[in-house]
Structure formats: C-alpha cells, structure tokens
Amino acid sequence: MAEAQDLQKLAEREYEFGFVTDIETDSAPPGLSEDTIRMISNKKDEPEWLLDWRLRAYKRWLTLEDPAWAKVKHPPINYQDIIYYSAPKPKKQLESLDEVDPEILRAYEKLGIPLLEQKRLAGVAVDAVFDSVSVATTFKAELEKQGILFCSFSEAVKNHPDLIQKYLGSVVPYADNFYAALNSAVFTDGSFAYIPEGVRCPMELSTYFRINAANTGQFERTLLVADKGAYVSYLEGCTAPMRDENQLHAAVVELVALEDAEIKYSTIQNWYPGDKNGKGGIYNFVTKRGKCAGARSKISWTQVETGSAITWKYPSCILQGDDSVGEFYSVALTANHQQADTGTKMIHIGKNTSSTIISKGISAGHGDNTYRGLVRMQKGADGARNYSQCDSLLLGDQCGAHTFPYLEVQNSTATVEHEATTSKIGEDQLFYCQQRGISEEDAISLIVNGFCKQVFRELPMEFAVEANNLLSLSLEGSVG
Amino acid sequence: MTTPILEIQDLHARAGERDVLQGIELTVAPGEVHAIMGPNGSGKSTLANVLAGRPSVDVTHGKVLYRGADLLGMAPEQRAREGVFLAFQYPVEIPGITNMYFAKAALNAVRAHRGEKELDAFDFLSLAREKMKLVEMDEALMNRAINEGFSGGEKKRNEILQMAILEPTLAVLDETDSGLDIDALRIVANGVNSLRSADRSMVLITHYQRLLDYIVPDVVHVLSSGRIVRSGGKELALELEEKGYGWLEEAAAG
C-alpha cells in the first residue's frame, strides 16, 4: 500500500548534521575515578570548594543506580568506557573570537549558527559549547552594559564565584538523581546567565551544544538566574555527528526566578538519533528544573525534541512563590528506533500557583513515545490550578505512544484538569489535501505542523520557523 | 469536434469487497453540467472517488480520459493540479492549520504546476475575499482550523469556496446538497451557478431532485447497481421525483 511505504520512508529520515570536524582535542583517557575529577577540576583551575562539591557528588553517585523506571530500553552503559573530558586544543589563550579555531567556526557555520557577531542578524547572543567546552560567547560586551552576565560556566566560576556558589545545586542538588550526580561530578562547562533586578534582557540568549569527539560524554551545566522583576528568553540547540556507538549526554539545567521575574526557556534538541536500524545515536539523559522562588514569578519550558536515540527528560517547575506560574510545552518526535520518555513535573507549593502542560507526541516507524508527568499540589497550595493536555499522533502501525500522568493532590482547594487524545494521520486527511493539489509529503508536514501548533507558537519567532523546518525536514523523502 | 472534458469507458471498480461500478459509460463536453442520480448504494460516491483517485477504491477495468489524457494514471494531487476538483460529501477536519493557509497552499500548488507565480499572503487575501462573497462566507471562518467546528452548511460552502479559488476544469460535487437547509442550499447553488462557464464542466452527484431546481443540469443520468440505466434531459429528474427509482431498476433488471 502506497501510504505504508511512504510512512516507512518518513520513518527512515536521514540526519543532516552528522559531519565530523577535524580538530585537535585535548582529551582525558576513558574512565571515571576521583583522579579524573581532580584532573578536570585542575584543568579548569577551579577553586577548592567546587572540587569538594564534585567529589561529594561522585561519592553519592557511586551509591546510586541507573534509573530503571522509564519506558526505554538500552543495553547497560559502561561508565568506565566514556571519556569525561574532551576540549578543542587551543593554540594559546583565546583573547577574542578571531582566535577560535577556524574549523570550529566552520562547523558552526555549517550548522547555521554563525558566531561572528558582525554577520549575525541582530537579536540573539550565542554561547557555543563544543565537546563540553564553551568556545565563544557573542554580544557579551553589549549585554554587560545592562549588567547582564552571559558567559561560559567556567568563566562564571572564575569571575562570579559568589553567584555560582549561591545558586549551583540550589534547584537540582547533586544527589537529585543518578545522572544529575554524575553530571555534578564531571561537568566540564556550560552556560551561565544572570539578569539583574528589573532588567529585561534585550535579546534572546542562546547556547548551541555540539558533540564532536568520539566516545566522549557531554556533561554541561546551565544556570540561569533572573533577579527580581527581570525577564529573559533563552534558547538551546544541539547536534552531534553520526557515529555507530551510542554517546551519553547528561546535562543539568537550573533556573531560578526571583520575585516577579520571568524565564522562558526553549530547546530545539536535534542530537543524532541513530541510523534507521537503531544503531548509534545519543542517549539524552537530562535533568532540567526551574524554581519559581519569588512571588508572581514565571518559568516557561518549551521543547522540540526530534533527535537522540533515547530521550529521558522532564523539565520541571517548583512553584514556591505565591501566584507563580509554570508552563511546559513539548513536541517530541520519535522515528526509526528512537525512544522518548519525557514530560514534566509541576510542584505546587505556594498559594494560587498555576501550571499548564501541553504535550504533543509524534511517533513514526518503530518509535516509542512516552509522556510522563507529575502534578503535585502540596498542602499549602491553596487555590492552585493545573491544566494538562497530552496528545499523541501516530504515523504507521509499528510505533507506540504512552501517557503516564501522575497526580498528587493534598489540598482540597486545588484544581487539576487532564485531557488526553491519541490519533492517527488519517488517509482521509491526506487524500483531502492531495485532492487540493498538495503532495502527500507536504500534506504530512502540514498535518504534523498543525498538530504541533499550540507548542510552536510558544517559541520565539525565528525558532518557530526553525522548528517548523526541522519537522518538515524530518518528514522529507516521505514520498517516492 | 472538441475533445470532451471527461470520457468514461466501461468502468468497473471495487470498494472493499464489493464490485460497485459495473461498466460506466459517460461523456461530458466542455461547459456541460451532468447530474448523476440514483438510490443509495448505486455507486454514485464511488464514481466520484474514482475520478479523484481515492486510494481505497480499485479500478478493475475500463478507461477514464480527462481532456483526452489517461486520468487513472495520474496521482491524486496531479489530477487536482490539472484541474479536477472534488467537493467532498464529508469534508475533512484538519486541526491547527487555518482554512486560509490551506486554501493558499492549494492554490499555489496548482499555480506552480501551471508555471504561474505563487501568490503571497496579501494577494491571496484579496482574491479570497472576492471569492468569499460568492458563497456568503464570513472571513472569521477563514482564520479557523480547516472545517474544525464548522456546521454542515459551512463545510459545504467551504468546499464551493475552494472550488471558486482553484477554478477547476472539471468539478465533481458529491452530494453537496446533503444536510443543507433551504437557505444554505440556495447559497451553495448560487455559488456553483456563478462558476458555470463554457470551459468548465461539472458532475453533480445527488440523491434528490431538489438540488436540480437550483442548479439546472444539461443532462441527467440515473445510476443503478453500478451502471447508468437511463439518461435524459432535466425533466428526467422530475420524473424520478414522482415515480422513485424503483421502476427504473425493474426496467433495468427486465
């Protein structure tokens, strides 16, 4: 049947960003021990307190086990086979962007992320993280004029140790879970941003993560702090070369919003998903959590997850401040043999806190897509409200979609609403579009984009376009 | 002699397990409006679906020529781009995509096929506004998701609007009158009549004579058990109205 063949092709879409950049790297030997951690800390010239924190995390990690509750399958990971530190080898200390290895700049150009500021369309400041190390941050000086700090995590440790010490681990403690503990022990770099009181960040801040080296894990940390009344919109993007081995990406993202502050965090995740037989690809095991610490603060997560062999990720909000707001908008696409177990946790602590969850799962090929979400209304959360909507779209009959909503309500004045639907792209819908002259491929893309509309409209404009293109690209070649 | 718009020769088709069409013969000249009437299950909608290329219907025998070319060899979207339009009996809902965006995508697909420049949103809007008047369509409906939450009448008007925008050479209207009240029927019929022209042919598929009071056909055919059993002028429809389909079916059997 024509439709089944087309869907199969769709499910076997190719990965566009699979190239490898040939640069010299400074890598540690594989394996994890206290010595590895001391080596990383030493390489980064870190203060004693940070090394101690890493070692505490490591000791805790040794007592933990890989979480087994997610609805994903993979062979056991040998953590001694992974390289925990790999950095592009700089010829000398970098003074400016001009001194970044041109091969790295070219790699980013290829990805459509030009780092040379004069070439950028105005409006986005980028921090580029290449194999765990931040190689360039654009628009830094301009942001500093408003007191906004935006730099690599390592720089922040050096230049703003007070802020790092205050907030590091304040939302995701190192003992939080297996991967968070691992990250805390071995993280190499990442992004840091601080928006001072009352400042509205005038441009999108963006971090672009790239895994290049083989057999390495990428362990970065992102920490964003929006002080009272501040606003920031932040975007992260990610890609990796095509390799036959699975690579581990275990990041931690912490957001802190103080009184009346707002953080909008958008992700377009396009790590290498593996080939059509399920070989290779990134294991994306990420802990992301935001704390609405102050009254009337707001944290909004928007994610478009199209990559990775396995995604294990639950961007969450702790709604501590009264009247604070948490949002989670997600599109997760699993094709070929991709697996995703993703969702969110909304922990309502403060009074009149509210949260919205909109999750759109698309499964194609042998893809397996799970929404897992927790809404907890704690005792003191008088008048708290949650609305959840989880929709699944199936393409073909080999894929799966699952929804696991957990609700814990300890306050009788709280309101929780949950809606869920599962649908298939209907032959009727495709035929209707075709009868109007629209090709089957464009019709699938149209229907899928329509399905994701509620989430895409939450993305900053230019990234909504990128997300649209990414999905369309993923659907390309669906017609013979 | 001018080439007919549509020539159907000894067409047999299966839908599911059933041989629904069993030797259809039909020729439609440019500018003509043909009505195809018949009882439920006679194969009217199957015929419409064969012409549009719905994958679930299998043609087992016969030929269909569209302006002299083999229609059955074309993919559904190619037929559409060549000017074959089907007004659906049950228009489909597609969430998240506005009616306006969809109609523009459809028109631009057709224009690209003809080698014409694609219309931008601005030009398309003025064109669409012009056409909306034909079917007394409210602009608010254009900014809603395709057919989502539309009433029966709104869906059918939307079909005729799309037809007006795409300006097909052959329009097949599959029970466009079903489920319409008298006011909606009048609006839809006015829209269709305004699209009649010397180079556009139409095939109206209907169960009831009522539609033909508003859209007066050149030829009326009666379909029974997958065959055209009788053809005539518009007065044939009136005769059917009076006598029902039974006498024709008996005549065909005998």
Image: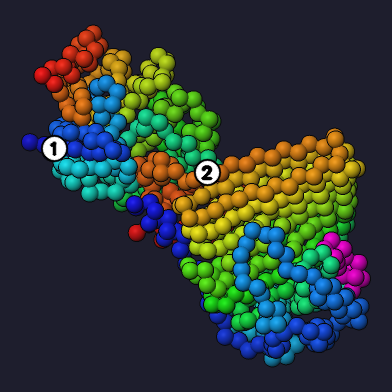
Circle 2: residue type: Ser
Is A24 placed left or right of A441 in the picture? right
Residue B130 appears at what percent x and percent y? Answer: 42, 31
Residue A468 appears at what percent x and percent y? Answer: 54, 55
Q: Are marks 2 and 1 in contact (CB under 8 Å)?
A: no
Q: How is the image coloured?
A: rainbow
Specify whether residue A88 is painted magenta. no
Q: Nearer the viewer, mark 2 or mark 1?
A: 2
Task: Tell which subunit mark 1 falls on.
Answer: B
Q: Residue pushed farthest bottom?
A: A91
Is B121 placed left or right of A404 in the picture? left
How many numbered discs sit on the rendered protein? 2
Residue B138 appears at what percent x and percent y? Answer: 50, 27
**Vertically, is A256 above or below B186?**
below
Can residue B96 be seen here? The reply is yes
Q: Give the residue number, with chain letter if any, for mark 1.
A: B9
Secondary element under disc 2, as helix, strand or loop, is strand
Circle 1: residue type: Gln
Specify whether residue A162 is painted magenta. yes
- State which quadrant residue B244 falls in: top left
Q: Residue at x 69, y 75 (%)?
A: A218
Secondary element under disc 1, as helix, strand or loop, is strand
User: What is the span of residues highlighted in magenta in the rendered image?
Assistant: A161-173
Task: Tell which subunit mark 2 falls on.
Answer: A
Q: Give the position of the C terminus of chain B as an image quadrant.
A: top left
**Vertically, is A121 above or below A424?**
below
Q: Give the residue number, with chain letter if any, for mark 2.
A: A423
Can residue A468 be seen here? The reply is no
Q: Residue at x 55, y 77 (%)?
A: A243
